[in-house]
Image (cartoon, rainbow, N blue to C red):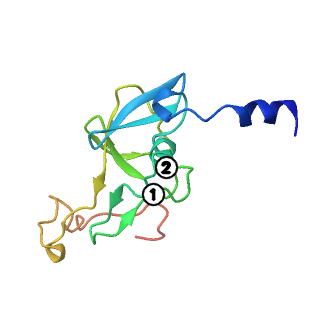
Amino acid sequence: MTRRTRRAAARPDPAPEEAAGDVVAAFDGAPIFAPRGASIAAALISSGRTSWRSTRDGERRGIFCGIGVCFDCLVEVDGESGQRACMIPLRAGMDVRSATGASTPESGGEAPAGLDAAPPADTRAAGGGRA
């Protein structure tokens, strides 16, 4: 055992709220903690949460890719929905809320405006070949 590991083993790990330099925010009204620079997703995972969003079918989602590609980790941040938890650093006082999928008639709700609207007839794709 090295001197460094002996020192670390001799000290108990501080509770998240006791760690110096931690950022404190709220997730669905409950406090969450993370070191400065950590993402919202990292703070949620370190608090024991593995999912924080539900799809329109009610399936639970959390972090998947961790690099902002898949959109599985969406949350609402300070009233702005559709934010990727893996890409946004946790800031002090931030209000993070779990996200739910869009309602559909099949799921017992109404679809958001424009979700089921057909595209205009003259819509064209760039580079789609001859018109």
The residue labelled by disc 1 is: 50
Q: Where does the N terminus fall, quadrant-wise? A: top right
Return the x and y of residue 33 as percentages of the image width and height.
45, 34
Classify 34 as above or below 98: above
Whether 131 is drawn above or below 18: the answer is below
Amino acid type of the residue that numbered disc 2 sits on in the rendered structure? Ile
Residue nearest the observer in this picture, 37 or 16 = 16
For the point 48% across and 70% down, the residue is 129
The outermost residue toward the front is 10
Q: Specify whether 92 is left or right of 34.
A: left
Secondary structure type for disc 1: loop
Identify the residue position indicated by label 2 in the image: 45
Tell whether 84 sits left or right of 69.
Answer: left
Single out the residue that lies furthest toward the right.
2
Are the residues at dot 1 and dot 2 in contact (C-beta closer than 8 Å)? yes
Mark 1 or 2 closer to N-term?
Answer: 2
Q: Residue at x 47, y 38 (%)?
A: 88
- Residue at mark 1 to residue at mark 2: CA–CA distance: 6 Å
